[in-house]
Amino acid sequence: MQSHRKIPWSLIACIVMVASTWGVVQYKLKVGESNSPTPNSNLLAESFNADSNLPPSEQFVKLRSDPRSDQFDIDSAGATIRSEDAKGANIEPVADTVALPTTEIATTYGTFYGLPMARFSDQYWLLRNDGAIQSIPNDIIQTERSMPVDFRVISVDQLMTDLRDEFGNHYLVHHQKPYVFVAKSEHMGQWAARFRALYESMRRVCMTKGLSGTDIEFPLVAIVFGSKDEFLRYASRANVALPDNCVGYYSQRDNRIALYEDDSEATAQDTLDTISHESAHQLAFNMGLHRRCVSSGLWLPEGFATLFESPAFSNISREGRSSWPAARIETWRKIHGDREKLAEALDSIVRNDNLFTHDPDLAYTVSWALTYHLMEKEPRRFADYVHQTGQLPLGHELASIDRWHHFRSVFGREPAQYAPLIQKHLSGIR
C-alpha cells in the first residue's frame, strides 16, 4: 500500500445537507432567460424563525413531517422499489420533458417563485431557478398561484451578473461548463482546472461503471474565498453552522460549494485534496446519482464522494495514480486486520447512520472501502443499487431493517460477509 500524506480529520471539508442523503429531483427544465420574476437571492439566506425555537441552521434540517408509516417493498429480483407513502410529501417530481408553470408563493416576508417540490405539515419546499431549495414555513404563506409562464433554469449570463453583484469587484466570475466560478483572478485557472478534472473523472466513472447519470440542469456555483475570515462571514450570512477548521462545504440548500485558500503551501494542498470530496457531492447530486429528500443511508453518498479524494479519481486519468484516499489510510491500517470489527462496521453503516456520529473516521473509511470494492468488483449490481436508491419516492426514509434487506437483495450477501472480500481486495491495491 503506497504511503500518503495524512490529512487531519479536523481539516476535512464538511457537507451542509438539508436532509442526510439528498440527491437530485429530476426535473427536465427549459434553460435560458425567463419572463417570470427572478427570486430574491437575499431571501434565500433568511431564516423564518419567528415562531421556532430551533437555531437557523437547524430549521432546514429538522422537519416535522406527518408521522405516517412507510411501506417499503422490493420485488423478488431486487429490481423494483415501491413505497405506499412519501412520509409527508405530497408533490412528486416530474420526469418528462414537459413545460412546467412557475409557481408564485406570496408570504409575509416577500414573494418566491419556482417549482413546488414538497409540502410537509409545517413547511413548503420550492425549487428555485438557480437550483437552490427555498424552505417556506406554511404559517407565513398568504397566497399560492400558478403563473402563465414556464419555469426556466436561470441563464449563465444572468447568474454571472447576479454573482458579480453579490461578490463585488474583488472577485472574478468565470464560466466553464458546467461550472460558474467565483475566485480571485490570479488563482482562477488553478481552481477551474481542478473542478473540471473532477467533472471529467466523474463522467468517466459513470460511463465505465454503468452508472446512469443525467445531464446537469443547473449551473454549478463554486466560490473560492481569498481568506478564512471571508469564508466564515459568508457561511454566517447563509446561516450555516460549521465545525472548527472546516476548509469548505457543499450546501444542498444553495447548491453551491464554498471554500477558502490558505497561504500555507502544505495546507493549500490538503485543501485541494479534501475539497474533492465536496465537489464529488455536488456533481453526484446534480447528475442524479443521489436524490434529494430521500434518506436511504449515508454510506453510499459519503463512500462515493470519498472515492474522489484519491489521486486516481480526482484526476482525468487514473493511470499510475493511487486509489487510496490519504485521509483514510491511518484508520484502515488500524482495522484492516480485525475482521470482526470490520464486519460489525459494515453491518452498522448499512443499517443506520449512527457510526457517522460516534466514530466518523471509521464510518467514512468503511463506507469508502465498501463503495470501492462494490464498484470495482460488482459494478453491475452496484449500478443497480445506486439507480434503485435514486428512484425512491420524494420524502421517503428507509427504516433500518429495510436498508439491510435492500442491500442483501441486490448484492446477494449480508454487509458483514463482505469483510474478508474487502480485506483481500484492498491488500492488493496501490
Image (tube, rainbow, N blue to C red):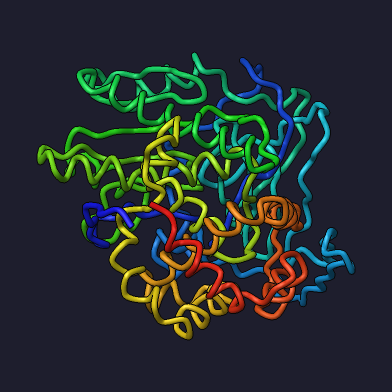
Horizontally, residue 369 falls left or right of residue 259, namely: right
Residue nearer the viewer, 37 or 8: 8
Residue toward you, 287 or 333: 333
Nearest the eye: 407 or 14: 407
Q: In this view, does 424 lie above or below 117?
A: below
| Number of numbered discs | 0
* Residue 38, percent from left and from top: 56, 26
* Residue farthest along the bottom direction in this orientation: 340
Residue at the spot 85% in from the left edge and 59% down from the top edge: 80
At 80% from the left and 38% from the top, the residue drawn is 95
Compared across the picture, whether 242 is left or right of 51 comes to: left
User: Which quarter of the rendered picture does the N terminus lie within?
Assistant: bottom left
Q: Which of 56 and 95 is in front in this view?
A: 95
Q: Which residue ends up furthest to the right in the rendered image?
A: 76
The spot of residue 278 in percent (x, y) is 41, 46
State the residue at coordinates (68%, 65%). Answer: 121
